[in-house]
Image: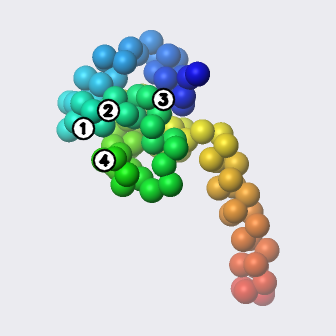
């Protein structure tokens, strides 16, 4: 099963070795770059788990020439959109 990173890398014909090499150039450790390639970060609740910090995901987005938000699965984005959209009426009532 492909994860978001692999799908984006495939679009620009980037192999795992190329991705890891580019991440290393940006100061990311090889094990962390490999975890990102495998999509381990997609299962985390906290982005400081196992040395996968948000800053490393920003590096990955830069390597793949996308925005950081594109690295997250559609499932996670749907949850975020749902939470934000449910908060809008409450915020409008507070302001009104």
- Disc 2 on helix, strand or loop? helix
Q: Badges 3 and 2: C-beta atoms under 8 Å apart?
A: no
Label placed on residue 28: 1
Q: Badges 1 and 2: C-beta atoms under 8 Å apart?
A: yes
- Residue at image coords 54%, 30%: 4
Mark 3 is surrounded, within 10 Å at the Cα level, by few (under 14), some (14 to 19) or many (20 or more) other residues, namely many
Label placed on residue 33: 2
Q: Nearer the viewer, mark 3 or mark 4?
A: 4
Q: Is residue 85 left or right of residue 35?
A: right
Q: Report the quarter where the C terminus lies.
A: bottom right
- Residue at image coords 73%, 58%: 82
Looking at the image, is mark 1 or mark 2 earlier in the sequence?
A: 1
Mark 1 is surrounded, within 10 Å at the Cα level, by few (under 14), some (14 to 19) or many (20 or more) other residues, namely many
Residue closest to the eye, 61 or 24: 24
Mark 4 is surrounded, within 10 Å at the Cα level, by few (under 14), some (14 to 19) or many (20 or more) other residues, namely some
Mark 2 is surrounded, within 10 Å at the Cα level, by few (under 14), some (14 to 19) or many (20 or more) other residues, namely many
């Amino acid at each position: 099963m492909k994860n978001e990173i692999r799908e984006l890398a495939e679009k620009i014909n980037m192999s795992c070795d190329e991705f890891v090499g580019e991440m290393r150039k940006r100061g990311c450790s090889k094990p962390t770059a490999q975890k990102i390639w495998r999509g381990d970060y997609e299962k985390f609740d906290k982005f400081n788990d196992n040395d996968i910090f948000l800053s490393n995901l920003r590096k990955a987005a830069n390597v793949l020439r996308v925005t950081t938000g594109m690295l997250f699965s559609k499932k996670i984005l749907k949850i975020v959109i749902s939470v934000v959209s449910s908060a809008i009426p409450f915020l409008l009532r507070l302001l009104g």
